[in-house]
Image: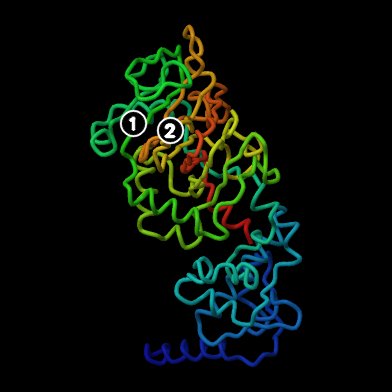
């Protein structure tokens, strides 16, 4: 057969497959065929209705959409209706909008995960985006993903802090750097002695203490001002802090908080702060392991009694435990008070009452919540609190909590 004639026949076959009248022909019987193979024996008209909600069908006008219909059939047949993980969602996962396949096929599927369209696509077009499980808060928020990778292995935490404490580039960028506590004891700055310790020089002597480090010029004034601005303006602004998942208004936590999220995450200044947080931790943790920044405001007398940032139920969730806390001080507390107080550090030395870090505008404080050799277990030495702010004073700060696994992707899914 001539090559030109072969090409004409091939084009004609493709045209007939795409434009075939919407009357389903009996599919050919193929012995031991898989669901994916069976999909290619069905017309686009059949596939357009197969996974659509009752009374719906899918529009298809080009070959990309037809290929997407086959992809949807493969996903639904071989995964959703075959894997017990999807048991609770499979009977409710439909194409609920007539142009789902078209939208998912266009622009490389960007509409499935674009910030402007992903909520719509997750609710109306989940099979087209292969995200039927996004409809289940139980699967997305509480499911433990056995394939998720831990960012820390035994010993990694110590190696990260060793690099942080010795890298001259970090000292130049964000210093002065002060090591308040470290494994094996010893330190080189403020924080030794009682809770009233301020910027006095000295040496900490904490037998086999956890790492506690500060960088005094981590944030610029512009960065601090932007964080405070967003604290006041995102959503309803600062709201009474909660303790874990309890109700607002607790006697042991009298601050107000807000979260840096939504459009603020795209602010170049917020992006730069995130980049600096990743840099100072040696790029050990991907951005998705960070919770969004939580901005805090403490008024006169505002405090947070001693607590731990490790929350045991996190171990059963996809993102795993918080392994590091970074606290950013956004202003000087001229009235005094507001120190971050570690009740069990330094207490072994005679006459001391733990270790306190004084608020200072631009300062960054970092410490671990877990053990170096067992990074899924709590380090009981890092219970901490925020001491009461002095009369007429105000304290602004921001928390950056880092998880051992991806935090943002499961949380982005479970919000739907």
- Going from N to C along the chain, the mark reached first, 1 or 2, is 1
Q: Is residue 156 left or right of residue 70?
A: left
Q: Residues within 10 Å of mark 1 (few under 14, many from 20)?
A: many
Q: Is residue 195 left or right of residue 169?
A: right
Q: In this rendered view, identify the residue nearer to me: 141 or 57.
A: 141
Please say if 28 is above or below 380: below
Colouring: rainbow
From the top left corner, tell me how far across and down residue 208 is, in percent.
45, 14
User: Relative to 399, is 13 above or below?
Assistant: below
Q: Return the residue nearer the eye: 235 or 159.
A: 235
Q: Are marks 1 and 2 in contact (CB under 8 Å)?
A: yes
Determine the residue positioned at 70% across, 43% down: 246
Residue 166, given in percent of the width and then of the height, sits at 29, 27
**Quarter of the image with the N terminus in it:** bottom left
Image position, residue 329 (x, y; %)? 42, 39
Q: Secondary structure at mark 1?
A: helix
Residue situated furthest front in the rendering: 392
Q: Nearer the viewer, mark 1 or mark 2?
A: 2
Mark 1 lies on residue: 164
Could you say which disc has been placed on residue 366 in the image? 2
């Amino acid at each position: 057969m001539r090559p030109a004639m072969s090409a004409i026949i091939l084009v004609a076959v493709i045209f007939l497959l795409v434009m075939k009248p919407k009357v389903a022909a009996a599919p050919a019987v193929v012995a031991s065929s898989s669901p994916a193979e069976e999909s290619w024996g069905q017309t686009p008209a059949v596939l357009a209705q197969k996974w659509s909600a009752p009374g719906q069908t899918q529009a298809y006008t080009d070959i990309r959409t037809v290929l997407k219909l086959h992809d949807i059939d493969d996903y639904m047949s071989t995964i959703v209706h075959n894997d017990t993980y999807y048991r609770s969602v499979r009977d409710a996962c439909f194409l609920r909008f007539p142009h789902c396949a078209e939208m998912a096929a266009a622009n490389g599927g960007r509409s499935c995960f674009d910030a402007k369209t992903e909520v719509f696509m997750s609710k109306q077009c989940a099979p087209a985006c292969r995200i039927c499980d996004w409809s289940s808060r139980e699967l997305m928020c509480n499911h433990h993903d056995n394939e998720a990778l831990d960012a820390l292995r035994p010993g990694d935490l110590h190696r990260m802090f060793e690099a942080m404490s010795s890298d001259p580039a970090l000292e130049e960028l964000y210093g002065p750097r002060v090591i308040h506590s470290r494994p094996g004891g010893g330190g080189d700055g403020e924080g030794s002695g009682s809770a009233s310790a301020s910027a006095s020089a000295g040496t900490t002597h904490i037998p086999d203490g956890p790492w506690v480090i500060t960088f005094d010029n981590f944030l610029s004034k512009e960065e601090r001002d932007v964080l405070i601005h967003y604290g006041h303006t995102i959503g309803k602004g600062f709201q009474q802090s909660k303790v874990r998942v309890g109700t607002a208004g607790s006697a042991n936590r009298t601050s107000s908080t807000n979260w840096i999220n939504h459009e603020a995450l795209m602010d170049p200044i917020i992006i730069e702060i995130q980049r600096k947080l990743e840099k100072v931790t040696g790029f050990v943790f991907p951005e998705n392991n960070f919770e969004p920044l939580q901005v805090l405001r403490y008024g006169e007398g505002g405090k947070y009694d001693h607590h731990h940032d490790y929350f045991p139920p996190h171990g059963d969730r996809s993102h795993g435990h918080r392994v590091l806390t970074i606290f950013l001080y956004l202003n000087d507390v001229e009235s005094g008070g507001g120190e971050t107080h570690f009740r069990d550090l330094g207490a072994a030395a005679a006459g001391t009452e733990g270790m306190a870090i004084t608020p200072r505008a631009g300062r960054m404080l970092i410490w671990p919540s877990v053990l170096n050799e067992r990074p899924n277990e709590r380090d009981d030495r890092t219970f901490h609190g925020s001491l009461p702010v002095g009369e007429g004073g105000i304290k602004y700060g921001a928390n950056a909590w880092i998880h051992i696994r991806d935090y943002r992707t499961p949380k982005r899914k479970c919000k739907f």
